Image: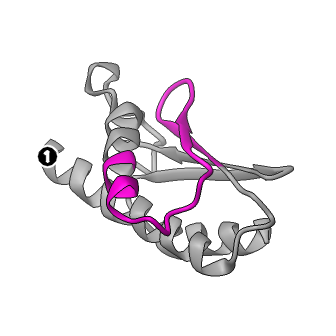
Amino acid sequence: MGEYLRAGLTAAFGNHPNTGDIRSGKGLLRREFVEDRPTRKNFPSELKFAASLRREMMKRRRRHADTPCGRPRSGAGDILFFAHRSSLPRRRDDRLVSVARDAVDAVLGVLT
């Protein structure tokens, strides 16, 4: 199931101009967000992009009871970690991807 979530995040953000790397390990996916994809230039630190994105995702999570229990966590820089639970049905992974995509659009809309 972790591979299913990874595939969903890759489909949603694979060609997105503000995403960098996606990495995965045991039950944890890491998604990097950058100001400029070709140069991998980070957002200015004062924007706190990852923290803003996490807040937007949590707002959307509260509105939808079927959003996964695993919380995205901000890391150093503009990186979000997605904790995956193998016991969750695929529709919950689909919802997590949808919430992440909508939150990215909302945060980038404020910045531009």
Q: Give the structural element (helix, strand or loop) at label 1.
A: helix
Task: Measuring from the top left, give residue 44's x and y in whole percent.
Answer: 31, 25
Residue beneath the point at 68% across and 66% down? 6
How far from the left and from the top, in percent, is residue 65?
A: 44, 65
Residue 92 can be seen in this image: yes
Give the total number of marks visible in the rendering: 1
Q: Can you see residue 112?
A: no
For this view, does 106 lie left or right of residue 41?
left
Q: Is residue 52 above or below residue 67?
A: above
Give the quarter of the image for residue 85: bottom right
Q: Give the residue drawn at x 66%, y 74%.
A: 7
Query: Could you tell me which quadrant the N terminus lies in?
Result: bottom right
| Furthest residue in direction top, as rendered | 46
Residue 40: % across, % down: 48, 42
Outermost residue on the bottom side: it is 91
Foreground residue, 79 or 44? Answer: 79
The residue tagged 1 is: 110
Amino acid type of the residue tagged 1 in the rendering: Val
Nearer to the camera, 17 or 111:
111
Is residue 44 inside the magenta stretch?
no
The vertical placement of 3 against 22, above or below, is: below
Question: Residue 99 appears in which quarter of the rendering?
Answer: bottom left
Looking at the picture, the colour scheme in use is one colour
Residue 7 shown left or right of residue 34 in the figure: right
Q: Which residues are magenta?
A: 58-82
Residue 34 image position (x, y, % from top left): 42, 43
> Would you say residue 69 sits in the magenta stretch?
yes
**Residue at x 41% of width, y 41% of height:** 54
Q: Is residue 79 left or right of residue 56?
A: right
Q: Residue at x 77, y 65 (%)?
A: 2
